[in-house]
Image (spheres, helix red, strand yellow):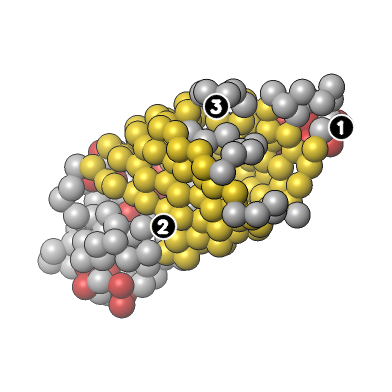
Amino acid sequence: MKYKKVHLALLAFLGLNLFSSTAHAEWGVSIGMANQKSQYKGISNKPTIIPDITYRESGDKHGNNVASYDLILTSKNAGFSEKDSSVFKGMKGRKNSLDIGGEIIFNSPYIPLKFEASKDFRASKGFQASAVLGGVSPNNTGDLQIRPYAGVRYQSAKVIQYHYGVRSNEVTAKRKVYKGKSAITPFLGVAAVTNLSKNMQLYGDIAFEKRATSIANSPLVNSKKNDLKASINLVYWF
């Protein structure tokens, strides 16, 4: 219940900023690919197609470009089916998430600071949030911007249980019941963005993640203690 109150409060805050400001606003749609399933056994780096819709408002009521407020609709966690890997044989498929949430990005010429929170309304019904220091600015005006970043991600028990848990009716001799707990994942990465045209941008991202214990203990994942995640997205702004 307390996490529900937290993410609802954040979204309400974002909404108030979006509609009370006189700053620049725009819509963005994107299509991208990411190796969201790479932690599962037998899947390696099979890419997942990720659509995304973003509403962004930049600046404060005085027109200063000090922050950006985003409302986002995307998929943050990939599902799976039996055909993806033999480790899923006899299991009910898991759906890709449909996450709705918001971001607050405090802009800086050198070190942006971003806070993000979202809820999955399709699959796990769980909540996740992250804080990121560094990375590319959402208001890139140059031809190419490449910057490192560091952050931490929280995922609720519902997210972990849905994507990494094993239900009682899915147990086999090699697969025991697993009930996942909430996870905290620290990460380091490098992000890049370039403007292809006045309205189109290309984003790239690669990150090194320390696998959370509640994910690492799942019988569905490989034996790695860390994950290398990569993504690429083509965005068009209206």
Under circle 3, the secondary element is: loop
Neighbours of disc 3 within 10 Å: few (<14), some (14-19), many (20+): some
Q: Look at the numbered disc 1 and give the secondary structure of its residue.
A: loop
Residue 104, picture quadrant: top right
Q: Quadrant of the C terminus?
A: bottom right
Relative to 198, does residue 188 appear above or below in the rendering?
A: above
For disc 1, the marked residue is 22
**Mark 2 vs 1, N-terminal side:** 1
Q: Is residue 67 left or right of residue 61?
A: left
Residue at 38% x, 56% y: name it. Answer: 36
Residue under pointer 3: 112
Q: Nearer the viewer, residue 21 or 198?
A: 198
For badge 1, the amino acid type reads Thr
Residue 143 place in picture, x, y as percent: 56, 43
Q: Nearer the viewer, mark 3 or mark 2?
A: 3
Q: Which residue is farthest left?
A: 173
Distance Cα–Cα, label 3 vs label 2: 23 Å
Residue at image mark 2: 34
Q: What amino acid does circle 2 point to?
A: Ala
- Residue sitting nearer the eye, 130 or 61: 61
Picture residue at 57% right of the left edge, 34% below the top:
137
Up/down of 227 relative to 23, above or below: below
Q: Quick one: quadrant of the N terminus?
A: top right
Tell me residue 110's x, y (percent): 52, 23
Tell me residue 193's x, y (percent): 52, 45
